[in-house]
Image (tube, rainbow, N blue to C red):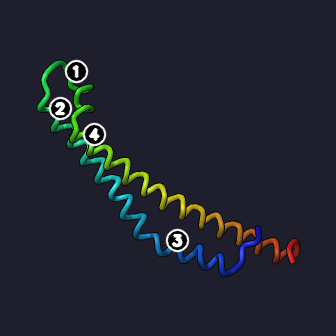
Amino acid sequence: MVVSEQRLEKALSLIAETDNEYAEYVGAVLRAEYMAECSESLAYQQLTGTVEDRKRAVKLVPEVQKAWENYFTVLVNMERVKARRKREFIVIDVYRTQEASRRIGNIQ
């Protein structure tokens, strides 16, 4: 695979353009996790029974399930952006390797 300068520029642009998007997703994941844990805590306080019964029952509360579903949705979206960025970093590494080989005469 030969990486052109155009492809390198595209990779660099995508990384630069997604910096804020990725940072926002990281924050959203942390926020969603915190909110899901808060939701569990609130539901746990309202339940009765033994500690083990309440730990199991809290997972079945619709608000808790919705909060965790939101967390996993945001996490998947963050991982998509992360994977796209990682692929572009690989393109940059291939370009660097290709240029280093060209400098020492292994590639024309």
Residue found 33% across the figure and 48% down from its top: 71
Name the disc covering residue 32, or none: none
Q: Earlier in the sequence, mark 2 or mark 1?
A: 2
Residue identifier under label 4: 65
Q: What element carries label 2?
A: helix
Residue found 82% across the figure and 76% down from its top: 102
Residue identifier under label 3: 15
Residue identifier under label 1: 53
Quarter of the image holding residue 47?
A: top left
Alpha carbon distance from label 3 to label 4:
34 Å
Dot 2 crowding, Cα within 10 Å, few <14, some 14–19, many 20+: many
Verify CB contact (< 8 Å) between mark 1 and mark 4.
Answer: no
Alpha carbon distance from label 2 to label 4:
13 Å
Alpha carbon distance from label 1 to label 4:
17 Å
Q: Where is residue 104 in the image (x, y as percent from the top left)?
A: 85, 74
Q: Earlier in the sequence, mark 1 or mark 4?
A: 1
Residue 2 as seen in the image, left or right of residue 51: right
Dot 3 amino acid type: Ile
Dot 4 amino acid type: Gln
Dot 3 crowding, Cα within 10 Å, few <14, some 14–19, many 20+: many
Residue found 65% across the figure and 76% down from its top: 7
Dot 2 amino acid type: Tyr
Residue identifier under label 2: 44
